[in-house]
Image (cartoon, rainbow, N blue to C red):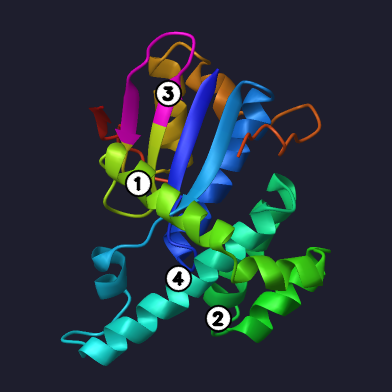
Amino acid sequence: MLEVYLFVNPLGARCMRSERNIMKLADHLNSKVSFQFVPLLNQQIIEQSLTARPTLAERNDRFNVYYRAILAYKAALFQGKRKGRSFLLDMQSAVVDHHRTFSQELALDLAKDCQLDLDMFVEDCDSDLAKQAFRTDQKLAAEMKVEQSSSAVIFNCSASQCGLLLNDVTYESLCDVCESQGVATKEMLMAEPNYPQNKEAASAGGSSRPHLHVL
């Protein structure tokens, strides 16, 4: 079984594509992959989202927007992994595809669409538990030596305790990893699945070969 940790910018287009690639892999492998989308926030992500030579106030404002978005995602996750994942994808789609600015109003709209308990959601967004979950995620990223969003750390639980760091999470690169690890052939993974999609296999492109690092 593969265990995948994808570190994501909660408002990023590239991360949204990476998330969908991993869910597609889970559909093809059925119950053979477990995945988590882990929010990542660091200075590099903030700088990449701003114009050249941003002011300190602009950096702080952007950090606060991303931080509030992450806390909202964690609050949604507290009500179930499926709802949390749906909230994250809807939030990214609203910002990336529909050009909406993240705000508490947007978060509440998305929470309603995902059928979350709104009172619980609002309370959890400002809870110490959500803030602690954020710190735990950043610690995990540091332990796995992840510095940029849309990076995945992949473990083959049946073969090795070492993780592989994949910096460009295309579907083809995921297929290459599966083939190299003896999980499934690339030919099988590139075919359309002939069974119902299983997007609950979680516990939480280009044509080049993947760029991997053993952790």
N-terminal of the two: label 3 or label 2? 2
Q: Which mark is residue 155?
A: 3
Give neighbour class at mark 3: few <14, some 14-19, many 20+ (Cα, 10 Å).
many
Give neighbour class at mark 1: few <14, some 14-19, many 20+ (Cα, 10 Å).
few
> Which residue corresponds to mark 4?
67
Place of residue 102 in the rendered image (x, y in percent of width and height, measured from the top left)? 55, 81
| Magenta stretch holds residue 164 | yes
N-terminal of the two: label 4 or label 1? 4
Q: CA distance from mark 4 to mark 1?
A: 15 Å
SS assignment at label 2: loop
N-terminal of the two: label 1 or label 2? 2
Q: CA distance from mark 2 to mark 4?
A: 11 Å
In the rendered picture of this protein, how many numbered marks are placed on residues?
4
Q: Amino acid at mark 2?
A: Phe
Question: Residue 70 or 48: which is nearer the viewer?
Answer: 70
N-terminal of the two: label 2 or label 4? 4
- Image point 59% across, 71% down: which residue? 126
Q: Which mark is residue 102?
A: 2
User: In which quarter of the view is residue 148 placed?
Assistant: bottom left
SS assignment at label 3: strand
| Magenta stretch holds residue 146 | no
Place of residue 8 in the rendered image (x, y in percent of width and height, measured from the top left)? 44, 55
In the image, residue 139 sits, relative to residue 76, either above or below, namely above
SS assignment at label 4: helix
Outermost residue on the front side: it is 128
Q: Amino acid at mark 3?
A: Phe
Q: CA distance from mark 1 to mark 2?
A: 25 Å
> Which residue corresponds to mark 1?
139
Give neighbour class at mark 4: few <14, some 14-19, many 20+ (Cα, 10 Å).
some
Mark nearer the viewer, 2 or 4? 4
Left of 153 or right of it: where is 130? right
User: In which quarter of the view is residue 196 placed?
Assistant: top right
